[in-house]
Image (cartoon, grey):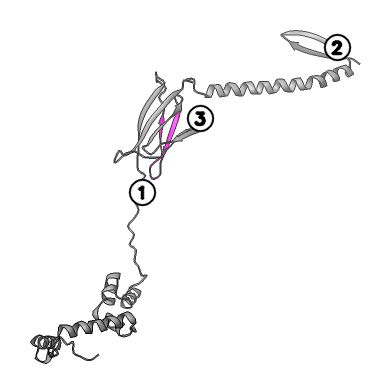
Amino acid sequence: MLDLFLLNISKKNVLLIFTPYYCSMRILKSFPLYCSTLMLLFVTVFTSKAQDDAPKDNRLVQLSGVVVDEEQLTPMPYTTVFDSRQARGVIADYYGYFSFVVVPGDTLYFSYYGHVTSSFIVPDTLTEDRYSIIHIMQRDTLNIPEVTVYPWPSREQFAKAFVEMQPYEDAIRRAQRDLSGESLAFIAARVSSDASLAAGYDQNQVYTHLYRGGLLPANNLFNPYAWAKLVQDWKAGRLKRE
């Protein structure tokens, strides 16, 4: 039995008569072509949509600028500048200077630690291929309530730590104590004499004998300066036994 198919091609009705076997083979052979045509149709639609969303002004502009702080107008080094449409960006140098290529209508985002992230839209009315800006950023200030920090959880623990605290002692005080006359005499009494010390002591005795040659030995019993020092030490309490 013959099947009849009515197809509308270029607004003309054509009557085609096929056998069942021949019709099935034609459909199978034409299936890849149908799929390719359908995919091409989808690609064309999405491409048109993307072209409609893209900015109509495709001119390239060299955008340069400096990022400064709002309060002191000082340069902000290493600020991040990001172009949201092109999904790329740059980092400013030590002096807050940056420069890169943009398209009129692009939105730029500036971010820096401790500051509020701000944006800038490249004007679409530019007539030249270069544009310079000075971008000012605000500090991200957060006011928090006052906090009092105590070194000890309670007054009782503070009083105990204060009573048990060791006196303050720095390097100067330790040096003064170690180099005092009492400390040096205590150390000298416990240091054994060597050959050089014995030779020096003997040489001092020889010089003393030569200095006092033919004279009687000195007797401090009749020395007024020795008596005056004795009275001073007695009044000062230095003669007490330890």
- Relative placement, left or right, of 3 versus 233 is right
- Rendering quarter of residue 207: bottom left
Specify which label sits upstream in the sequence, 3 or 1: 3
> With 161 as the anchor, is 22 left or right in this view?
right
Callout 3, which amino acid? Gln
Seen from the viewer's position, the closer of residues 34 and 54 is 54
Q: Which residue is mark 3?
A: 86
Provide the residue designation for mark 1: 142
Residue 158 at x, y = what percent? 33, 73
Asked whether 56 or 94 is in front, the reply is 94
Residue occupying the point 11% across, 92% down: 221
Per the rendered image, the range of residues in magenta is 106-121
Q: Which mark is residue 17?
A: 2
Q: Secondary structure at mark 3?
A: loop
Q: Are marks 3 and 1 in contact (CB under 8 Å)?
A: no
Residue 107 in which image quadrant: top left
Q: Rounded to the nearest whole Å, what is the CA distance between mark 3 and mark 1?
A: 33 Å
**Earlier along the polypeptide chain: callout 2 or callout 1?**
2
**Residue 70 image position (x, y, % from top left):** 31, 39
